Image (tube, rainbow, N blue to C red):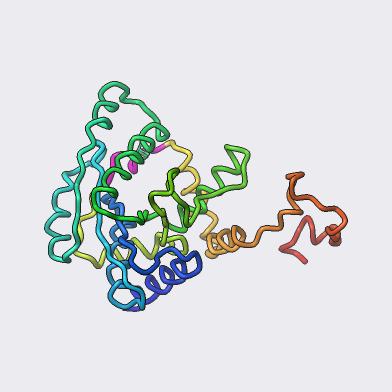
Amino acid sequence: MDLEKTLLRKVGEAISKYDMIRPGDRVAVGLSGGKDSVTLLEALVLLQKRAPIDFTVCAFTIEQGKFLRPIAPFKEYLEKKGVEWVYYHDNPSFQLLEDQPDHGCDMCSRYRRRAVYEVARGMRANVIAFGHTADDFCESFLRNALFNGRISSLPPITYSSHKDFRIIRPLVFVTEDITTAYASHLTAPVIPCGCSQKTGTVRRSLRDYFTEMEKDHPRIKESMLSAMGNIELHRLLDTRYQDPEKTIAKPVTEELFPMLT
Ligand code: SF4
Protein backbone atom coordinates (compact mmCIF):
# COMPACT_ATOMS: atom_id res chain seq x y z
CA MET A 1 0.00 0.00 0.00
CA ASP A 2 1.44 3.44 -0.96
CA LEU A 3 0.11 4.92 2.24
CA GLU A 4 2.04 2.37 4.26
CA LYS A 5 5.21 3.10 2.29
CA THR A 6 4.79 6.83 2.95
CA LEU A 7 4.15 6.22 6.64
CA LEU A 8 7.17 3.94 7.06
CA ARG A 9 9.41 6.31 5.10
CA LYS A 10 8.45 9.25 7.30
CA VAL A 11 8.75 7.29 10.55
CA GLY A 12 12.07 5.81 9.39
CA GLU A 13 13.33 9.28 8.51
CA ALA A 14 12.49 10.58 12.01
CA ILE A 15 14.05 7.56 13.75
CA SER A 16 17.26 7.89 11.81
CA LYS A 17 17.50 11.69 11.86
CA TYR A 18 17.14 11.91 15.65
CA ASP A 19 18.75 8.55 16.49
CA MET A 20 15.54 7.56 18.28
CA ILE A 21 15.93 3.75 18.39
CA ARG A 22 19.21 1.93 19.09
CA PRO A 23 20.25 -1.74 19.14
CA GLY A 24 18.80 -3.66 22.08
CA ASP A 25 16.09 -1.07 22.85
CA ARG A 26 12.76 -2.11 24.27
CA VAL A 27 10.22 0.45 23.05
CA ALA A 28 6.96 0.92 24.95
CA VAL A 29 4.32 2.64 22.83
CA GLY A 30 1.77 4.78 24.67
CA LEU A 31 -1.60 3.75 23.20
CA SER A 32 -4.06 6.53 23.85
CA GLY A 33 -6.98 4.85 22.09
CA GLY A 34 -6.80 7.20 19.11
CA LYS A 35 -5.78 6.77 15.46
CA ASP A 36 -2.30 8.30 15.90
CA SER A 37 -0.91 5.98 18.54
CA VAL A 38 -2.40 2.91 16.83
CA THR A 39 -0.70 4.00 13.59
CA LEU A 40 2.57 4.48 15.47
CA LEU A 41 2.38 1.01 16.97
CA GLU A 42 1.72 -0.54 13.55
CA ALA A 43 4.61 1.36 12.00
CA LEU A 44 7.06 0.30 14.73
CA VAL A 45 5.97 -3.34 14.55
CA LEU A 46 6.51 -3.32 10.76
CA LEU A 47 9.85 -1.54 11.04
CA GLN A 48 11.00 -3.92 13.75
CA LYS A 49 10.70 -6.76 11.23
CA ARG A 50 12.55 -4.88 8.49
CA ALA A 51 15.06 -2.65 10.27
CA PRO A 52 18.71 -3.69 10.41
CA ILE A 53 18.81 -3.02 14.16
CA ASP A 54 17.40 -5.33 16.78
CA PHE A 55 14.71 -3.86 19.07
CA THR A 56 11.46 -4.99 20.67
CA VAL A 57 8.07 -3.29 20.87
CA CYS A 58 5.43 -3.41 23.60
CA ALA A 59 2.48 -1.15 24.43
CA PHE A 60 0.57 0.28 27.37
CA THR A 61 -2.53 2.35 28.03
CA ILE A 62 -3.10 4.52 31.07
CA GLU A 63 -6.75 4.62 32.13
CA GLN A 64 -7.50 8.02 33.70
CA GLY A 65 -11.27 7.83 33.43
CA LYS A 66 -11.50 9.86 30.21
CA PHE A 67 -12.25 7.24 27.55
CA LEU A 68 -15.73 7.40 26.06
CA ARG A 69 -15.91 3.62 25.59
CA PRO A 70 -14.23 0.65 27.28
CA ILE A 71 -10.66 0.25 26.04
CA ALA A 72 -10.64 -3.51 26.61
CA PRO A 73 -11.12 -4.43 22.86
CA PHE A 74 -7.46 -3.51 22.40
CA LYS A 75 -6.54 -6.67 24.29
CA GLU A 76 -7.68 -9.04 21.56
CA TYR A 77 -6.25 -6.85 18.78
CA LEU A 78 -2.81 -6.73 20.39
CA GLU A 79 -2.82 -10.39 21.36
CA LYS A 80 -3.32 -11.27 17.68
CA LYS A 81 -0.31 -9.13 16.83
CA GLY A 82 1.77 -10.73 19.55
CA VAL A 83 2.38 -7.36 21.22
CA GLU A 84 2.56 -7.33 25.01
CA TRP A 85 0.12 -4.75 26.35
CA VAL A 86 -0.43 -3.40 29.84
CA TYR A 87 -3.71 -1.69 30.64
CA TYR A 88 -3.11 0.35 33.76
CA HIS A 89 -5.98 1.72 35.81
CA ASP A 90 -4.45 4.77 37.49
CA ASN A 91 -6.20 5.15 40.84
CA PRO A 92 -4.67 8.57 41.69
CA SER A 93 -6.07 9.98 38.40
CA PHE A 94 -9.55 8.70 39.32
CA GLN A 95 -9.21 10.31 42.72
CA LEU A 96 -8.21 13.55 41.02
CA LEU A 97 -11.32 13.35 38.80
CA GLU A 98 -13.46 12.97 41.89
CA ASP A 99 -11.76 15.72 43.93
CA GLN A 100 -11.24 18.23 41.12
CA PRO A 101 -13.48 17.38 38.14
CA ASP A 102 -12.39 20.56 36.32
CA HIS A 103 -8.64 19.98 36.68
CA GLY A 104 -6.71 21.18 33.66
CA CYS A 105 -4.36 19.44 31.24
CA ASP A 106 -1.27 20.33 33.28
CA MET A 107 -2.46 18.37 36.29
CA CYS A 108 -3.81 15.51 34.17
CA SER A 109 -0.58 15.11 32.24
CA ARG A 110 1.51 15.27 35.42
CA TYR A 111 -0.49 12.36 36.81
CA ARG A 112 -0.20 10.50 33.52
CA ARG A 113 3.57 11.01 33.32
CA ARG A 114 4.08 9.39 36.73
CA ALA A 115 1.91 6.43 35.70
CA VAL A 116 3.68 6.12 32.32
CA TYR A 117 7.10 5.81 33.97
CA GLU A 118 5.78 3.28 36.46
CA VAL A 119 4.29 1.11 33.73
CA ALA A 120 7.28 1.41 31.38
CA ARG A 121 9.60 0.39 34.21
CA GLY A 122 7.41 -2.64 34.90
CA MET A 123 7.61 -3.60 31.21
CA ARG A 124 11.43 -3.34 31.30
CA ALA A 125 11.32 -0.71 28.56
CA ASN A 126 14.09 1.86 28.14
CA VAL A 127 12.30 3.86 25.43
CA ILE A 128 8.80 5.36 25.52
CA ALA A 129 7.20 6.28 22.18
CA PHE A 130 4.34 8.75 21.93
CA GLY A 131 2.05 9.26 18.94
CA HIS A 132 2.31 13.04 18.60
CA THR A 133 2.01 13.91 14.92
CA ALA A 134 3.31 16.71 12.70
CA ASP A 135 -0.02 18.46 13.39
CA ASP A 136 0.71 18.36 17.14
CA PHE A 137 4.20 19.80 16.59
CA CYS A 138 2.76 22.67 14.51
CA GLU A 139 -0.04 23.37 16.99
CA SER A 140 2.35 23.30 19.91
CA PHE A 141 4.68 25.70 18.08
CA LEU A 142 1.85 28.18 17.39
CA ARG A 143 0.38 27.81 20.90
CA ASN A 144 3.72 28.61 22.51
CA ALA A 145 4.34 31.59 20.25
CA LEU A 146 0.82 33.02 20.53
CA PHE A 147 -0.01 32.30 24.17
CA ASN A 148 3.19 31.54 26.07
CA GLY A 149 5.64 34.04 24.56
CA ARG A 150 8.11 31.33 23.56
CA ILE A 151 9.45 29.90 20.31
CA SER A 152 9.19 26.24 21.18
CA SER A 153 7.44 23.00 20.29
CA LEU A 154 7.57 19.34 21.31
CA PRO A 155 11.01 17.69 21.34
CA PRO A 156 11.21 14.74 18.90
CA ILE A 157 13.60 13.04 21.34
CA THR A 158 14.26 13.77 24.99
CA TYR A 159 14.89 12.00 28.31
CA SER A 160 12.86 11.60 31.49
CA SER A 161 14.16 13.77 34.32
CA HIS A 162 16.25 10.98 35.89
CA LYS A 163 17.38 9.79 32.44
CA ASP A 164 15.65 6.42 33.04
CA PHE A 165 13.83 6.60 29.72
CA ARG A 166 14.46 7.98 26.25
CA ILE A 167 11.21 9.56 25.08
CA ILE A 168 10.62 9.62 21.35
CA ARG A 169 7.94 10.94 18.97
CA PRO A 170 8.48 9.08 15.70
CA LEU A 171 5.39 10.60 14.00
CA VAL A 172 7.00 14.06 13.92
CA PHE A 173 6.90 14.08 10.09
CA VAL A 174 3.56 12.28 9.76
CA THR A 175 0.49 14.47 9.33
CA GLU A 176 -2.93 13.43 10.58
CA ASP A 177 -4.39 12.98 7.12
CA ILE A 178 -1.96 10.03 6.90
CA THR A 179 -2.80 8.58 10.35
CA THR A 180 -6.55 9.01 9.71
CA ALA A 181 -6.37 7.21 6.37
CA TYR A 182 -4.01 4.51 7.66
CA ALA A 183 -5.99 3.79 10.84
CA SER A 184 -9.19 3.45 8.81
CA HIS A 185 -7.61 0.42 7.05
CA LEU A 186 -6.75 -1.29 10.32
CA THR A 187 -9.03 -3.54 12.27
CA ALA A 188 -7.88 -1.77 15.43
CA PRO A 189 -10.53 -0.31 17.70
CA VAL A 190 -10.31 3.49 17.90
CA ILE A 191 -11.62 4.66 21.24
CA PRO A 192 -11.92 8.42 21.65
CA CYS A 193 -11.06 10.32 24.79
CA GLY A 194 -13.79 12.68 26.06
CA CYS A 195 -11.40 15.63 25.85
CA SER A 196 -11.04 15.24 22.07
CA GLN A 197 -14.71 16.18 21.69
CA LYS A 198 -14.41 19.50 23.54
CA THR A 199 -15.19 22.68 21.62
CA GLY A 200 -14.17 26.26 22.37
CA THR A 201 -10.59 25.28 23.24
CA VAL A 202 -7.37 26.84 21.96
CA ARG A 203 -6.52 23.51 20.39
CA ARG A 204 -9.80 23.46 18.45
CA SER A 205 -9.22 27.08 17.29
CA LEU A 206 -5.72 26.26 16.06
CA ARG A 207 -7.02 23.16 14.24
CA ASP A 208 -9.72 25.26 12.57
CA TYR A 209 -7.11 27.85 11.62
CA PHE A 210 -4.95 25.21 9.92
CA THR A 211 -7.95 23.71 8.12
CA GLU A 212 -8.91 27.14 6.79
CA MET A 213 -5.37 28.06 5.70
CA GLU A 214 -4.77 24.68 4.09
CA LYS A 215 -7.64 25.26 1.67
CA ASP A 216 -5.39 27.72 -0.20
CA HIS A 217 -1.96 26.66 1.11
CA PRO A 218 -1.93 22.87 1.50
CA ARG A 219 1.76 22.71 2.44
CA ILE A 220 1.83 25.07 5.41
CA LYS A 221 2.46 22.32 7.96
CA GLU A 222 5.40 21.02 5.94
CA SER A 223 6.74 24.55 5.82
CA MET A 224 6.31 24.99 9.57
CA LEU A 225 8.16 21.73 10.24
CA SER A 226 10.98 22.88 7.97
CA ALA A 227 11.04 26.21 9.80
CA MET A 228 11.47 24.41 13.13
CA GLY A 229 14.56 22.73 11.71
CA ASN A 230 15.95 25.87 10.08
CA ILE A 231 16.19 28.54 12.76
CA GLU A 232 17.94 31.83 12.12
CA LEU A 233 18.57 32.59 15.79
CA HIS A 234 20.35 35.88 15.11
CA ARG A 235 17.27 37.22 13.27
CA LEU A 236 15.03 36.84 16.31
CA LEU A 237 14.85 39.08 19.39
CA ASP A 238 16.67 36.95 21.95
CA THR A 239 19.80 38.89 22.93
CA ARG A 240 21.55 35.63 23.86
CA TYR A 241 21.89 34.86 20.16
CA GLN A 242 22.48 38.26 18.61
CA ASP A 243 25.65 39.09 16.77
CA PRO A 244 25.03 42.24 14.70
CA GLU A 245 28.55 42.03 13.22
CA LYS A 246 27.56 38.85 11.42
CA THR A 247 23.96 39.71 10.49
CA ILE A 248 23.77 40.96 6.92
CA ALA A 249 20.73 43.17 6.27
CA LYS A 250 18.54 42.13 3.37
CA PRO A 251 16.55 44.59 1.20
CA VAL A 252 13.56 45.85 3.20
CA THR A 253 10.97 44.33 0.83
CA GLU A 254 12.57 40.92 1.21
CA GLU A 255 12.59 41.27 5.02
CA LEU A 256 8.93 42.27 5.21
CA PHE A 257 7.37 40.44 2.27
CA PRO A 258 9.49 37.37 1.57
CA MET A 259 6.65 35.76 -0.43
CA LEU A 260 6.63 38.62 -2.96
CA THR A 261 10.32 38.87 -3.73
S1 SF4 B 1 -6.83 16.81 26.89
FE1 SF4 B 1 -7.86 15.63 28.53
S2 SF4 B 1 -6.72 13.72 28.66
FE2 SF4 B 1 -5.44 15.16 27.55
S3 SF4 B 1 -4.15 16.14 29.11
FE3 SF4 B 1 -5.97 17.44 28.87
S4 SF4 B 1 -7.40 16.76 30.43
FE4 SF4 B 1 -5.87 15.14 30.16
The x, y position of residue 61, in whole percent, is 25, 48
Single out the residue that lies furthest toward the top.
Answer: 99
> Which quadrant does the N terminus fall into?
bottom left
Q: Judge left or right: residue 98 versus residue 232.
A: left
The x, y position of residue 213, in whole percent, is 55, 55
Residue at image location 13% in from the left, 61% down from the top? 79
> Which quadrant does the C terminus fall into?
bottom right
Q: Which residues are magenta?
A: 192-199
Q: Nearer the viewer, residue 118 or 255?
A: 118
Q: Is 162 placed above or below 65 here? A: below
Quadrant in which ligand 1 is drawn: top left
Q: Is 49 placed above or below 112 here? A: below
Residue at image location 40% in from the left, 35% down from the top? 105
The x, y position of residue 42, in whole percent, is 28, 66
Residue at image location 50% in from the left, 49% down from the top? 139
Q: Name the image quarter holding residue 132.
A: bottom left
Q: Name the image quarter holding residue 88.
A: top left
The x, y position of residue 133, in whole percent, is 42, 57
Residue 110 colored in magenta in the image: no
Q: Is 90 placed above or below 206 here? A: above
Q: Judge left or right: residue 150 versus residue 89.
A: right
